[in-house]
Image: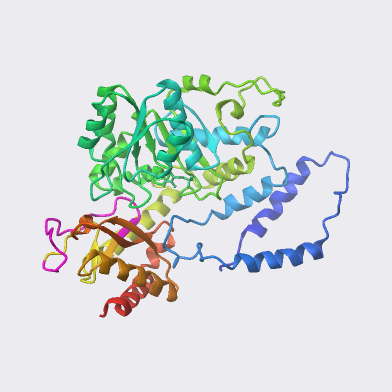
Amino acid sequence: MPHDPVPEMLKRATEALEAEFGALPAYRTDPDPGIEAAERVLEETARRLGDNYPYFHPLYAGQMLKPPHPVARAAYALAMKINPNNHALDGGRASSAMEVEAVREIAGMFGWKEFLGHLTSSGTFANLEALWMAGQLAPGRRIVGSEQAHYTHQRISGVLKLDYASVAADPRGRMDVEALEGELRKGDVGMIVATLGTTALGGVDPLEEILTLAKKYGCRAHVDAAYGGYFGLIADELEEPARRAFAAIDQADSIVIDPHKHGLQPYGCGCVLFRDAAVGRFYKHDSPYTYFTSKELHLGEISLECSRAGAAAVALWATQRLLPLVRGGEFAQGLSKGRRAALELHRRIKLDGRFVGLGGGAPGSPSARNPGHPHPHLPEHDIVVWALRGNTHEEASERAKRAFDACAARGLHLALVQLPGSWFGMDGGVVTCLRSVLMKPEHEAWMGAIWERLSAACEEVCGA
Ligand SMILES: *Cc1c(COP(=O)(O)O)cnc(C)c1O
């Protein structure tokens, strides 16, 4: 592991924070935290934590896991000396103000000045609030997403007792708008969930067309950008359809983004935004436990969750202070690096006969019944998905699983995903593929090392 700058970063800030409360009479904590016993336990804790994939390392290129920025970790740790609760201003005055500012910056990234929004414990909970709102505004009407929408939408709909329908996606993982219109014609859809950055493929639903249909059929359009939301900052570097989708995002009724995915935050940080601030009326509650000492709006009055980590807001605020959410800034450049790493991996896969890129056919190979897609699709974000060639989808799947293990044995950690075989020009069935999420800026410089290991692993599995 590289040298950890966080303890050093915290020195002056810790003194500054202690000075803020310097006027209080001194006291001892009870019981006194014995350093030696704690050190023993923490050493044991460290050993236990060793049982993890090295998520922080550039050779970890599997699931959506990105190390929090050192400033986020430091700010979170600093806030732990206070442990604020952003439910009500009484529990977290400063951190509530920081949440309001940080969320305003995120909304600003989407072009919104007037809105209602707050942080949540996760993208799932943020989406739950958006779906709940759809149910409040149009009770009994259905929610529709694509089959590549996050699996939790269906589950959340079940919790909210809203019917959910899923419509087909194309081989780029994008919602099929004709299939969508088929559902809308039934006349009972309350909200469409458009995903900008699907979890499996990073696919971008055609938001412009979806918004037109939402208007035509009188329903809401929610954008689940939990993963992909920040890519609006580098929209110029995306393919034309994704660029158009990001350009239309400000027309959505609600947006979800996960700072704990691409926003360099520790887990426990999602965000939901509503374009019409008047929806705040639905959150109204009358809790006898919340002693309002202020007449200002409490975040607990516009959130379904009660206690929420004020520290998450503090970490996000500090990170955005250091790395503002602006085009061309250092934060955006970090996204570009991962995106370039993905394009480079895609290029190498396309040129390598052992692999079939997503959307790539396999003309000439026995599995190729569908030579219609000779060119694999460019990744839309920083996620690359590809299959190993095989005579059948079963053989291709078996090879992918063995390649996954052979990569891990070489220190390279990828992920597996199951997709329709037809998306790779294979006949029918579901094929297990390799998937790599290249979300760390370091991935660009490490692509050579990643490829070397991948190539050697596949040589072992498929023969040279
Ligand atoms: C990750 C993700 C979610 C769920 O967010 P959590 O923070 O994991 O709860 C929802 N939608 C999309 C598109 C995601 O990528």
Q: Residue at x 26, y 42 (%)?
A: 168
Q: Which residue is drawn at 69% across and 67% down?
A: 44
Front-lying residue, 429 or 192:
429
Does 372 lie within the magenta span?
A: yes
Residue 176: horizontal and vertical position, in percent?
Answer: 23, 40
Please tell me whether residue 20 is drawn above or below residue 395 in the rendered image. above
Asked whether, in this view, residue 148 is left or right of residue 2, the answer is left
| Image quadrant occupied by the C terminus | bottom left
Q: Can residue 313 be seen in this view?
A: yes
Asked whether, in this view, residue 346 is left or right of residue 151, the answer is left
Q: Residue at x 48, y 41 (%)?
A: 124
Q: Which residue is drawn at 51% across and 62% down?
A: 56
| Image quadrant occupied by the N terminus | bottom right
Residue 288: horizontal and vertical position, in percent?
Answer: 70, 22
Q: Quadrant of residue 457?
A: bottom left
Residue 253: horizontal and vertical position, in percent?
Answer: 38, 28
Residue span colored magenta: 364-385
Does 449 lie within the magenta span?
A: no
Residue 155: horizontal and vertical position, in percent?
Answer: 44, 40
Front-lying residue, 21 or 35:
35
Q: Quadrant of residue 327?
A: top left
Please tell me whether residue 273 is drawn above or below residue 137 in the rendered image. below
Q: Is residue 340 visible?
A: no
